[in-house]
Image (cartoon, rainbow, N blue to C red):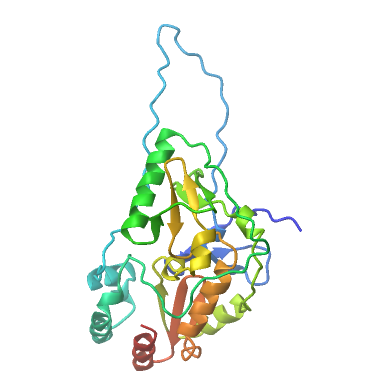
Amino acid sequence: MAVQWTGPRVIESKFSETNYIVRIEGKKDESQIYHVNLLKPCHQRLERVNLIVNGGEKNQERETEELAIPHPISGPNIYDFERIKADSALEGRLSLTEIESLKQLLGRHQKIFSNDPGKTHLVEHDFELISNKPIRSKPYRTSQRQNEILKSEIKRMLDLNIIEIGQLDYASPMILVESPGKDPRPCIDYHLLNANVRTQFFPLPNIEERVERVATAKYITVIDLAKGYWQIPLSERARRCSAFVTSFGTYIPLRMSFGIVNATYFFSKLIAQVLENCDTFAVPYLDDIATFSDSWEGHLKHVDEVL
């Protein structure tokens, strides 16, 4: 079965930080929720026209602007209730008493509001190799501009203790994915390693059923995890096998990388353990957790329990 883009579609509203309600005409349920990773902007093709240029003027080539990866404000504590109140439009949805009680609740948990990923002790990413033959690839050729972007991301990962410098028998190449209208995104090409790893499966829930459960609630709070994959440590074997190489060095991941086989399995397993006793009022969707309740007092209790 071939997978292809459809559209264009109209985005009706923003459901959460990473999810949008999209109108799809012709279906029984015309509106559906999509994660931002399943959407891409629609760019109309430019119309070609004939152009006469004065021969006396030289056509100077504009220098390519240096691209940089915009990182959000980072730090161990970025709690700002006034920003939360403004971004979520709480004043138009809650009473002053409810806003004050929410402020007190979040204030007790303000230490967990951070863009720096934490580290779980519940799950460790490990995998079983089909063959013990090392897989080592050469770094992809990149321009000086691309190298500067990669170096910036490498430095951030080193500072966050997500990776470390090292030399191993295994090495997969890091690449820079650049798409129109999007920021450049460093990725590791693990396709050779993934083909040599035994796949593990975790039963994924029916998303439509979960959306229906949440949609009927009176109060909904959506929590977005900071770099959810990076919060899962790697086993010694996984570290050794998932090392990656660039034109300026080799690095060893200490946390789970996006794109490596079984990553979804371990992340889903982690979230299931975290929400084990909260499944009646909290459901995960990718790296978001929606907490839902029918009363304000119950909602405060549920959010407190999830946090």
Question: Foreground: 203 or 252?
Answer: 252
Q: Residue furthest top?
A: 56
- When the figure is inspected, residue 41 is found, relative to residue 203, above or below; the finding is above
Q: Residue furthest right?
A: 1
Give the image location of residue 114, x and y in percent. 30, 69
| Camera-nearest residue between 21 and 148 | 148
Q: Residue at x 61, y 77 (%)?
A: 204
Q: Is residue 71 visible?
A: no
Answer yes or no: is residue 268 visible: yes
- Viewport quadrant of the C terminus: bottom left
Query: Where, by quadrant of the figure, is residue 223 drawn?
Result: bottom left
Q: Nearer the viewer, residue 177 or 244?
A: 244
Quadrant into which the N terminus falls: bottom right
Numbered circles on residues, count: 0
Q: Residue at x 43, y 83 (%)?
A: 291
Q: Is residue 305 above or below residue 32?
A: below
- Residue 43 in percent (x, y) is at 54, 44
Q: In which quadrant of the rendered view does residue 22 lie?
A: bottom right
* x, y percent for residue 139: 52, 42
Q: Nearer the viewer, residue 185 or 218?
A: 185
Res. 80 image quadrant: bottom left
Q: Position of residue 289 (x, y in %)?
A: 45, 77
Q: Measuring 57% from the left and 31% from the top, which residue is drawn there?
A: 47
Left or right: 18 as drawn, with respect to 133? left
